[in-house]
Amino acid sequence: MKLILSLLTGLFLFLQSSDLEALRNSYSKANLSVEGAKDFIELAEKKSSSDPVISAYKAASQILEAKVTTEKNKRKTFVKAGASSLESIVKANPNNAELRVIRMSVQENIPKIVGYSKNLKEDKTFILNNYSKQNSALKSYIKKFAQQSKTMTAAEKNSLK
């Protein structure tokens, strides 16, 4: 019985990590093109999980939807709903580095006129201070994000090893 439970738990964790890896890969390509954004939105909408990281990617997809929608009057709605959701997820999980990366990337890439950029310095500091505590997959993801980050300096990018 314990063996079956262990196998099921292992399978669940494996499937959840592959879902997360797929979301990470898709998200990293989402800002490169409209097609990449649409692919990420579609992938995120299919995911249902109580995992705060997956929920944060779903919130980011809502915000990104404002970029690709053709209905101008819905853009503000998408941004407000996604930002509100993302903020509540980060507030409930303040020590999760990946949530901080997601929020920082959203705030870096959203037009300044929207006014959603108040956490950039806070998130950058948290990411830099907690980088060494992360697992190797997340460290790799953070490094990749940092290389294209507009907020991190060259010295800060180089400090991530």
Image (cartoon, helix red, strand yellow):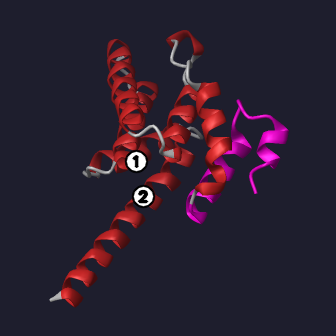
Is residue 108 something one can see in this rendering?
no
Does 109 sit above or below residue 29? above
First in sequence: mark 2 or mark 1?
2
Residue 67 appears at what percent x and percent y? 46, 26
Q: Is residue 103 visible?
A: yes
Mark 2 secondary-structure assignment: helix
- The residue that appears at 26% across and 52% down in the rendered structure is 49
Quadrant location of the N terminus in the rendered image: bottom left
Residue bearing the label numbered 1: 53
In depth, the one of 29 and 9 nearer the eye is 9
Residue count near mark 1 (Cα–Cα under 10 Å), binned few <14, some 14–19, many ≥20? many
Q: Is residue 47 left or right of residue 160?
A: left
Q: Is residue 154 magenta?
A: yes
Residue that extends furthest to the right in the rendered view of this protein: 155
Mark 1 lies on a secondary structure that is helix
Q: Check residue 20 in the rendering and tell me which mark sits there, or answer none.
A: 2
Location of residue 45 by image quarter: top left
The magenta-colored residue range is 135-161
- Horizontal and vertical percent for residue 117? 56, 19
Q: Which image quarter holds the C terminus?
A: bottom right
Q: Is residue 30 left or right of residue 108?
A: left
66 inside magenta stretch: no
Q: How many tags in the picture?
A: 2
Q: Nearer the viewer, mark 2 or mark 1?
A: 1
For label 2, the crowd category at 10 Å Cα-Cα, with few meaning under 14, some 14 to 19 and many 20 or more, is: some
Residue at the spot x=35%, y=64% of the render?
Answer: 16
Check residue 94 in the rendering and tell me which mark sits there, or answer none.
none
